[in-house]
């Protein structure tokens, strides 16, 4: 469907309003710790009309709330969402609640706030309760399950890796099809109700339950798609919305093929920049520099080598070589964080010398059952948002296109996120696919990092043009999300916007506080 109805939410909002008023007048509960409980599966419990917060750490409170599995049937089956709240450090000047989604899809909002609550509190100058949740279908909120036991998952994923040859690809095609069937059998009807629009309805309901008249929201990476979806479904309910690391909503919601192509569009450019900055920094700061061949030439040589024969990795347990698929995987996380670029360069140098242990260790965590489970969760949500246009039989043409889009990550992301959708057993019943041009009363602040490997800067430019009232702040830095490459300029703009609704002048560009491989980032490891 092309739009999403909000009437079921509004009905529950009216029923909950009296309870919300009583809740927001209650004093904060005392600090203490509570243990997590297993995530409930969809059931028939009644929809919650208030949030019963309980202490779960210093300045932290946790809760569960039941919401309809299908918002079009508010009296039907329900699911339970796990929530967390970090109390404002300046409660006497409290403005309200700042909701935050860390991305994914599938990242744990609960874990994000528990692990970084004080830092997130500073984003709002201590004047907001910071609230997040595990979105439906993920982590502790009715998670998508594709196996009935850990043993079954371990058996299924044993020996599976990212394919790079025709034979391997044919085998992985069968793996993707089998995975989709298993997800459909185990998770069943839940899969049709985990789209971003379903989560936007949850967010709207949570807003009413905390008692805020309008929403203050921070969305990171995929969280920017959730923000754009909410802003277009509920434009009059937005107080402030800060989106960092923009997803292109048009390409994302068109098809799985377009979505993956958009996600890797900036990757190779960032990898090239990593190697160019390495060369400029010299051998004292980058282990790949200072040789007859440039860092670009040396890494190209490494890729040629692993295509012919894997590189030994004796330092991993169990020992095993680095092949081409693992080499591509090994670069996924380092490119997102420029603070580790010097270490990544040193790891690439060691592989050139014949020991790929560090690179193989970085790749292997994605090849464990938990690693594959995280990828499957992301695929499940995105498949609900927009299915694949082509089936698995067309893998050669689809993967070929994605490889042309990004030599480094096209095939990785294609097998991760396109292949399951190409065989997915169901479609999202209430997916939102536009329009994306709503105007909010206050401008939405967009932050685009110039060299972002996962959400290309051009996505932020397009979002600014699409939205009816948005301001783009350019972060002239590196990595995925602006805080990976800190900038005092960005920090000031973030606080001014969330607290005072003040946006930077159009065309503002913020420089990072330092550059990769530069002074203050340390010397080349092993130099």
Image (tube, rainbow, N blue to C red):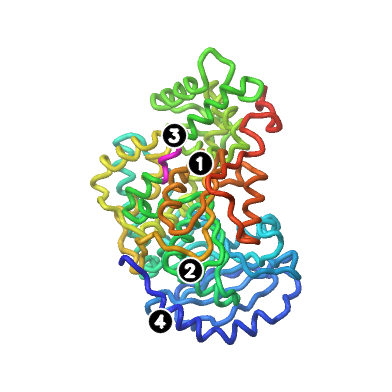
Mark nearer the viewer, 2 or 4: 4
User: Which label's residue is closer to the chain start, 2 or 4?
Assistant: 4
**Mark 4, residues whose alpha carbon is within 10 Å: few (<14), some, or many (≥20)?**
some
Q: Secondary structure at mark 3?
A: helix
Q: Position of residue 420 (x, y in %)?
A: 35, 53
Q: Position of residue 384 (x, y in %)?
A: 36, 61
Which circle marks residue 452 in the picture?
1
Quarter of the rendering occupied by the C terminus:
top right
Taking the spot 56% from the left edge, 22% from the top edge, the residue there is 279
User: Which label's residue is closer to the chain start, 2 or 3?
Assistant: 2
Above-or-below relation of 60 to 286: below
User: Which label's residue is closer to the chain start, 1 or 2?
Assistant: 2
Q: Secondary structure at mark 2?
A: loop
Query: Gap in Å between the C-alphas at discs 2 and 3?
Result: 36 Å
Question: Badge 3 is on which residue?
Answer: 268
Above-or-below relation of 404 to 378: above
Taking the spot 42% from the left edge, 74% from the top edge, the residue there is 69
Query: Gap in Å between the C-alphas at discs 4 and 3?
Result: 47 Å
Question: Badge 2 is on which residue?
Answer: 142
Query: Gap in Å between the C-alphas at discs 3 and 1?
Result: 10 Å
User: Which label's residue is closer to the chain start, 3 or 1?
Assistant: 3
Taking the spot 32% from the left edge, 54% from the top edge, the residue there is 254
Above-or-below relation of 428 to 417: below
Residue numbers of the magenta segment: 263-267
Question: Badge 4 is on which residue?
Answer: 76
| Quadrant hosting residue 348 | top right
Query: Gap in Å between the C-alphas at discs 4 and 1?
Result: 42 Å
Taking the spot 68% from the left edge, 33% from the top edge, the residue there is 521
């Amino acid at each position: 469907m092309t739009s999403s109805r909000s009437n079921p939410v509004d009905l529950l909002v009216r029923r909950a309003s009296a309870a919300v008023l009583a809740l927001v007048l209650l004093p904060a509960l005392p600090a203490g710790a509570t243990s997590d409980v297993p995530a409930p599966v969809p059931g028939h419990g009644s929809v919650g009309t208030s949030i019963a917060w309980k202490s779960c750490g210093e300045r932290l409170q946790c809760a569960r709330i039941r919401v309809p599995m299908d918002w079009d049937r508010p009296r039907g089956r329900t699911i339970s969402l796990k929530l967390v709240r970090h109390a404002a450090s300046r409660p006497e000047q409290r403005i309200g609640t700042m909701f935050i989604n860390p991305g994914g899809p599938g990242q744990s909002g609960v874990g994000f706030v528990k692990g970084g609550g004080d830092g997130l509190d500073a984003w709002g100058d201590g004047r907001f309760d910071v609230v997040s949740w595990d979105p439906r279908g993920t982590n502790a909120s009715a998670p998508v399950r594709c196996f009935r036991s850990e043993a079954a998952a371990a058996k299924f994923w044993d020996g599976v890796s990212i394919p790079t040859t025709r034979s391997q690809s044919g085998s992985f095609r069968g793996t993707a099809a089998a995975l989709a069937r298993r997800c459909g059998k185990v998770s069943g009807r839940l899969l049709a109700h985990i789209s971003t629009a379903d989560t936007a309805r949850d967010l709207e309901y949570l807003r009413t339950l905390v008692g805020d008249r309008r929403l203050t929201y921070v969305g990171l990476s995929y969280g920017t798609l959730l923000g754009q979806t909410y802003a277009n479904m509920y434009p009059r309910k937005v107080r402030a919305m800060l989106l960092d690391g923009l997803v292109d909503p048009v390409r994302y919601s068109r098809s799985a093929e377009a979505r993956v192509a958009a996600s890797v569009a900036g990757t190779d450019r960032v990898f090239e920049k990593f190697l160019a900055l390495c060369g400029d920094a010299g051998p004292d700061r980058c282990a790949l520099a200072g040789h007859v061949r440039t860092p670009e030439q040396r890494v190209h040589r490494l890729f040629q080598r692993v295509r012919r024969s894997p590189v030994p990795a004796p330092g991993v347990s169990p020992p095993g070589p680095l092949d081409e698929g693992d080499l591509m995987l090994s670069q996924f996380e380092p490119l997102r964080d420029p603070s580790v670029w010097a270490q990544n360069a040193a790891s690439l140098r060691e592989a050139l010398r014949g020991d790929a242990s560090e690179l193989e260790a970085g790749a292997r965590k994605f090849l464990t059952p938990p690693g594959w489970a995280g990828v499957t969760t992301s695929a499940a949500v995105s498949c609900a948002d927009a299915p694949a246009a082509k089936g698995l039989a067309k893998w050669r043409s689809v993967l070929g296109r994605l490889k042309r889009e990004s030599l480094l990550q096209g095939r990785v992301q294609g097998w991760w996120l396109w292949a399951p959708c190409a065989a997915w057993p169901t479609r999202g019943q209430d997916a939102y696919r536009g329009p994306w041009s709503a105007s909010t009363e206050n401008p939405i602040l967009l932050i685009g990092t110039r060299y972002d490997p996962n959400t290309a800067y051009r996505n932020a430019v397009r979002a600014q043009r699409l939205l009816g009232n948005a301001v783009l702040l350019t972060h002239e830095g590196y990595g995925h999300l602006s805080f990976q490459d800190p900038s005092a300029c960005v920090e000031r703009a973030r606080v001014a916007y969330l607290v005072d609704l003040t946006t930077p002048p159009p065309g503002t560009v913020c420089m990072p506080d330092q550059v990769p491989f530069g002074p203050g980032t340390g010397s080349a490891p092993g130099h």
